[in-house]
Amino acid sequence: AQTVTQSQPEMSVQEAETVTLSCTYDTSESDYYLFWYKQPPSRQMILVIRQEAYKQQNATENRFSVNFQKAAKSFSLKISDSQLGDAAMYFCAYRTPNTGANSKLTFGKGITLSVRP
Amino acid sequence: KAGVTQTPRYLIKTRGQQVTLSCSPISGHRSVSWYQQTPGQGLQFLFEYFSETQRNKGNFPGRFSGRQFSNSRSEMNVSTLELGDSALYLCASSLGVDLYGYTFGSGTRLTVV
């Protein structure tokens, strides 16, 4: 079974600084998708960024970028120029590309990010 | 376009009762998934429905069930509630073929007393 591990329960960053959130996963599959979701106090899970395992290029979305190391099964999220609105819980998630029996997201435990003004 | 709508937002029930939660997906989305979120266990997959058929099921007891209607709206039901069922229940919708296009609702906070 696939597992996702986020070992840091909490992190803090100064506004305008850069922070990196760590995630490792375990799978025997060669093709899969990885995601970072943000959950603010409003509770809605918001997709931050996604990465296809077959792509060597790291995904980037504005201030958010990932460092995807397939061999090491590592998928970290870098937030540049941190803003107060970035404060939230961040979840790393994994999914196989198959529909049917494996069509689900497997989440890590999450990390609470606080942003200091 | 409207997002994923979950009702109610909050719910308080007594042990032994049953509860039904509702999820209206984004228009055109045929897949609806349900997740349970608790501080101890994190986010756990309950089940997924696609075109009114359960396509995948997580490791939850039979007290947890769901269904999907022809308009893609989904309901999940929990019978014989236990204190441990207190959680945030999140619904996510997708086209079902776009394998990573999930959109989540804001959840239903269920408290069992």
Image (tube, coloured by chain):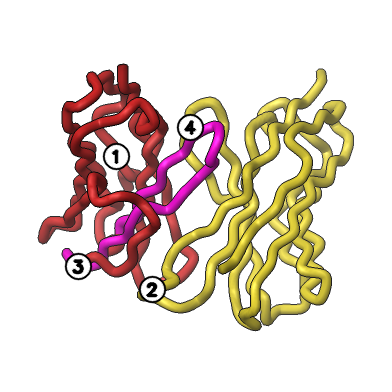
Q: Hey, what amino acid is under mark 3?
A: Thr
Q: Which residue is mark 4?
A: A43
Q: Main secondary structure of the magenta part?
A: strand
Q: Which mark is residue B53?
A: 3
Q: Which mark is residue A101?
A: 2
Q: Which residue is mark 1?
A: B5
Q: Hey, what amino acid is under mark 4?
A: Arg
Instruction: Between residue B105 and residue A60, name the one nearer to us.
Output: B105
Disc 2 to disc 4, how far (Cα)?
A: 27 Å
For the C terminus of chain B, which image quadrant? top left
State which region is magenta. B32-52
Q: Quadrant of residue A27?
A: bottom right
Image: B80 above or below A68 = above
Sequence-wise, which precedes: disc 2 or disc 4?
4
Q: Are marks 2 and 1 in contact (CB under 8 Å)?
A: no
- Camera-near label (1 vs 4) is 4
Residue drawn at x 73%, y 35% as measured from the top left: A9
Q: Are marks 1 and 3 in contact (CB under 8 Å)?
A: no
Colour of chain B in the rendered structure image: red
